């Protein structure tokens, strides 16, 4: 009887796109995928200086990739982005829609529909556009990985956050339906739902709020960006080929499935 081979976590030979990947969790995901061997397309929409610095640090870590500027909520820019990546790195095998915008906490009376629409654009429209653009290649080779980035806030029902929670809930539904649709083509669709993991955008958050959240984490420590990056590598790898339609919380036990 032959000995089963060990599961492979190598992404050698694969091309990954992580949107919004020059800062925050996206940057950590891109780095983790790159360190696992993928050629990574780093994407940004603004702040070219910060993006070029991120690319330099990415390459200094021994990773292979390139930088692509695009608004991933734009119906005209997304196909151009995927085409540009294909020309420089190869067709996209691993898609991680991660880009976001500001996420203010407000009572519902203080939101307007324009802000709600911006949330829907980033968390439903963008994953939809990106998925459609990447699918021809994934279906042709009968292999692909789509990893949506959700949030624990959907499970926790965080107050004064209705726009973000609603959009992330919609993205969760999108990924669940997409997972069963694409599974027959060898394409896995999963979601990572991080907890509050402090990154650059949280630099000015009130310390009292940070302390209050930290006190509730069963693991007794803050999550760090590489916690999310490691989960992305697993889901992108051959080892997760039979993991489909799952929403994996990376939050130290704040929510339980």
Image: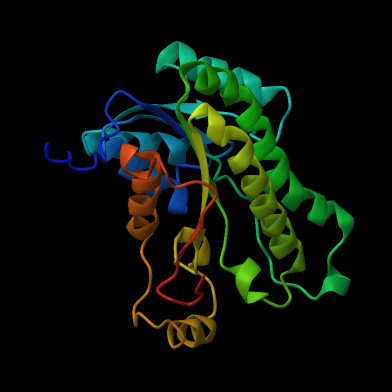
Question: Which residue occupies 52% across, 54% down?
Answer: 246
Q: Position of residue 223 (x, y in %)?
A: 38, 68
Q: Position of residue 42 (x, y in %)?
A: 44, 33
Question: Which residue occupies 69% across, 59% down?
Answer: 169
| Relative height, residue 251 to residue 87 (above, below) | below
Question: Which residue occupies 40% across, 48% down?
Answer: 232
Question: Which residue occupies 62% across, 31% down?
Answer: 130
Does any portion of residue 95 appear in the rendered image? Answer: no
Between 252 and 22, the one lying in front of the other is: 252
Q: Quadrant of residue 51?
A: top left
Does any portion of residue 207 appear in the rendered image? Answer: yes
Q: Position of residue 204 (x, y in %)?
A: 52, 71
| Relative height, residue 89 to residue 115 (above, below) | above
| Relative height, residue 147 to residue 63 (above, below) | below
Between 31 and 245, the one lying in front of the other is: 245
Which quarter of the rendering shows the N terminus?
top left
Q: Is residue 167 left or right of residue 2?
A: right
């Amino acid at each position: 009887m032959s000995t089963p081979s060990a599961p492979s976590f190598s992404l050698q030979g694969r091309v990954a796109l992580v949107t919004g990947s020059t800062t925050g969790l996206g940057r950590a995901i891109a780095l983790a995928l790159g360190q696992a061997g993928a050629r990574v397309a780093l994407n940004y929409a603004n702040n070219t200086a910060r993006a070029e610095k991120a690319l330099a640090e990415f390459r200094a870590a021994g990773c292979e990739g390139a930088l692509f500027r695009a608004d991933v909520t734009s119906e005209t820019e997304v196909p151009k982005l995927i085409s540009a990546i294909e020309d420089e790195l190869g067709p996209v095998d691993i898609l991680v829609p991660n880009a976001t915008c500001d996420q203010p906490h407000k009572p519902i009376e203080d939101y307007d529909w324009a802000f709600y629409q911006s949330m829907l654009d980033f968390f439903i429209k963008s994953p939809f556009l990106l998925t459609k653009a990447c699918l021809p290649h994934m279906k042709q080779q009968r292999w692909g990985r789509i990893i949506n980035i959700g949030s624990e806030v959907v499970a926790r029902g965080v107050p004064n956050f209705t726009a973000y929670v609603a959009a992330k809930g919609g993205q969760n539904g999108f990924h669940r339906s997409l997972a069963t649709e694409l599974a027959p083509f060898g394409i896995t669709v999963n979601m990572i739902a991080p907890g509050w993991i402090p990154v650059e955008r949280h630099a000015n958050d009130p310390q009292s709020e940070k302390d209050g959240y930290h006190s509730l984490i069963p693991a007794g420590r803050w999550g760090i960006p590489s916690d999310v990056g490691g989960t992305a590598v697993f889901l992108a790898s051959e080892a997760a080929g039979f993991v489909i339609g799952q929403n994996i919380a990376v939050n130290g036990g704040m929510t339980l499935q």
